[in-house]
């Protein structure tokens, strides 16, 4: 995830590679950073000393330990952005010096190809300026919106996990085509392009998806017959339940 | 202009009520006939001020626009009976589901060379002037004839011309539609009662909710999906309820219903064309009464009635 954000910033030319420093205990993931020209280290404190904007991109259970470690080096000028799922602003603020500018970011996987959907919310110490900075930087990775913290778990259910729902749907589309006689790889590429194209139309026309759907359905034609099958399978309700389940799970995990 | 109804049942009553309430036609310009005087709608029609008679021929004679408002299996008997009295001035409007223009024209052409036939599909809310009507004009019906019917039907709701091959779908959607709505309203009221509302209030509120929603949609440029979204505040009551509807396959049930009604209409038409409707489908008393009026008809066999052939096309009853 950190890699995705970094790549987005670099590709958009927002930050020169030399100004990005990434730290990790092992070299496993640092190779990719070095290849793009970023600097790397094994020392977390060095990142704090060297940077203004600091992304915390560790696994959630590791984060408290890391916060303890870096706390002495955190200063008023720092902007700390946590990507750790389920770790609340309250927890972050508790483990960092009072008044630290803290923000919480929830990205999704396609950030790595600059087509991400991200939401962030501000802690008490972070103001308009920090929010605008983050938004303008991260827009290079996709859609980035500020939200109340309560929306973050919903974003997980909708878009964080949502990416997986789309993969499932794409797989099923392709399988349908294979059943009807199309080779798999071709079907897969067409499925992906179909999803991409439909999404692009939604974003660019701003029209309601129900209207866009209606536009595709000629009377008595193929599409309406297919949609009837989808409705019979209660696809809508199932998808709603999926978003609900993921959101609830995110809430539960956050309580742990 | 005078209007006649062959048949004095729900449809005739609804249309007569609608036309008179709309002021487009005076009651005394309307005639309705039926051999069955016991129908509850007969007294209703009389109350409206419509001329009621037991003679279909009288209705034909006193009308310019003649609605065939009987059930589909009865249509062929009616056409045989009144065929001899149809003149060039008559516009014959069939409201019977599944009965094609060509089948009516074929029957009438044995009596009248160029019968003006219009096929229409309407629905019961014409009674409160919120009907949904479509019509298709037959071979010899002119544009003016269609426009005349359109004017009449527009006085009791929405009316538009369509190609005949769409009429079965219209039957499935707006012909049967009020029944779907009544079912929904009954259930919505049950929901209200379950949650503590008195029945009358629940029915009143449910009906008003559907009426209001329909009106909003008709007056809005927006897609119903958008209008739905406008009601669903995040995490609120409505979206929770909608999830239940979706889980139950609400949408697909409605699609199924429209499809089933349309398919059944076509099936019935097909059966009629193949002359496969048994006389058991027709009330014996009615059949007897019709036979009394038209001695030329005969039941061809014990099990099957030949619907679209007539033994003695030129016989006239006096």
Image: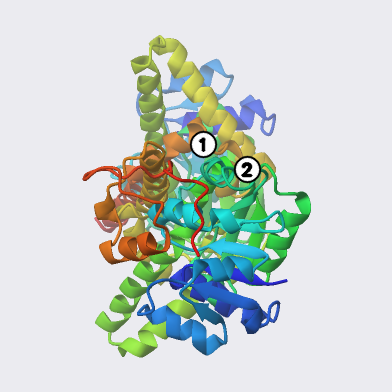
Q: Residues within 10 Å of mark 2 (few under 14, many from 20)?
A: few
Q: Are marks 2 and 1 on the same chain?
A: no
Q: Which residue is mark 1?
A: A220
Q: Nearer the viewer, residue B211 or A192?
A: B211
Does the residue at mark 2 contact the one at mark 1 (Cβ under 8 Å)?
A: no
Q: Chain of mark 1?
A: A
Q: Is residue B247 above or below residue B230?
A: above
User: Is residue A235 left or right of B131 when viewed as pictured?
Assistant: left
Q: Which residue is mark 2?
A: B163
Gap in Å between the C-alphas at discs 2 and 1? Answer: 15 Å
Q: Nearer the viewer, residue A236 or B260?
A: B260
Residue B231 position in % (x across, y down): 51, 68
Name the residue at 36% across, 59% down. Answer: B291
Q: Secondary structure at mark 2?
A: loop
Q: Is residue A142 above or below residue B69?
A: above
Residue B192 position in % (x across, y down): 32, 80
Q: Nearer the viewer, residue B275 or B292?
A: B292
């Amino acid at each position: 995830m950190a890699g995705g954000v970094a790549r987005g910033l670099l590709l958009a030319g927002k930050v020169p590679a030399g100004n990005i420093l990434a730290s990790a205990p092992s070299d496993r993931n640092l190779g990719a950073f070095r290849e793009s020209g970023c600097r790397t280290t094994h020392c977390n404190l060095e990142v704090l000393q060297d940077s203004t904007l600091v992304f915390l991109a560790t696994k959630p259970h590791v984060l408290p330990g890391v916060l303890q470690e870096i706390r002495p080096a955190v200063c008023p000028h720092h902007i700390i952005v946590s990507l750790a799922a389920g770790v609340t602003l309250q927890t972050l603020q508790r483990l960092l010096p009072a008044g630290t500018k803290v923000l919480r970011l929830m990205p999704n996987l396609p950030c790595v190809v600059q087509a991400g959907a991200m939401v962030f919310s501000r802690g008490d110490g972070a103001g308009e300026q920090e929010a605008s900075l983050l938004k303008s930087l991260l827009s290079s990775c996709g859609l980035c919106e500020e939200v109340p913290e309560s929306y973050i778990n919903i974003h997980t259910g909708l878009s964080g996990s949502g990416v997986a729902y789309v993969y499932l749907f794409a797989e099923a589309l392709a399988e349908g085509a294979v059943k009807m006689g199309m080779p798999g790889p071709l079907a897969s590429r067409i499925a992906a392009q179909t999803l991409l194209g439909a999404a692009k139309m939604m974003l660019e026309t701003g029209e309601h998806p129900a209207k866009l759907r209606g536009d595709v359905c000629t009377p008595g034609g193929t599409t309406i017959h297919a949609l009837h099958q989808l409705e019979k399978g209660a696809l809508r309700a199932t998808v709603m339940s999926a978003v609900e389940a993921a959101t609830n799970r995110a809430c539960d995990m956050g309580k742990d | 202009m005078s209007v006649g109804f062959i048949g004095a049942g729900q449809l005739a009553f609804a249309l007569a009520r609608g036309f008179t309430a709309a002021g487009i036609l005076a009651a005394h310009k309307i005639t309705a006939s039926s051999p069955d005087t016991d129908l509850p709608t007969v007294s209703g029609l009389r109350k409206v001020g419509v001329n009621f008679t037991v003679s279909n021929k009288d209705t034909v004679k006193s009308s310019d626009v003649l609605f065939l408002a009987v059930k589909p299996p009865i249509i062929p008997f009616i056409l045989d009976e009144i065929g001899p009295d149809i003149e060039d001035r008559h516009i014959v409007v069939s409201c019977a589901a599944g009965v094609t223009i060509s089948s009516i024209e074929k029957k009438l052409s044995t009596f009248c060379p160029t019968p003006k036939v219009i096929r229409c599909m309407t629905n019961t809310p014409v009674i409160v002037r919120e009907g949904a009507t479509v019509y298709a004009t037959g071979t010899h019906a002119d544009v003016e004839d269609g426009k005349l019917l359109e004017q009449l039907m527009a006085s009791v709701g929405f009316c538009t011309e369509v190609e005949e091959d769409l009429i079965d779908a219209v039957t499935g959607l707006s012909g049967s539609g009020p029944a779907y709505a009544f079912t929904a309203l009954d259930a919505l009221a049950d929901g209200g009662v379950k949650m503590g509302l008195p029945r009358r209030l629940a029915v009143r509120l449910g009906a008003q909710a559907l009426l209001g929603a329909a009106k909003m949609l008709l007056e809005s440029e927006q897609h119903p999906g958008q209008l739905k979204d406008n009601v669903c505040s995040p995490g609120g009551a409505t979206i929770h309820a909608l999830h239940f509807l979706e889980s139950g396959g609400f949408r697909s049930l409605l699609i199924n219903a429209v499809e089933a009604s349309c398919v059944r209409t076509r099936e019935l038409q097909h059966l009629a064309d193949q002359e496969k409707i048994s006389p058991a489908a027709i009330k014996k008393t009615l059949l007897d009464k019709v036979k009394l009026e038209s001695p030329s008809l005969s039941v061809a066999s014990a099990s099957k009635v030949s619907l679209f052939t007539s033994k003695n096309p030129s016989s006239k009853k006096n």
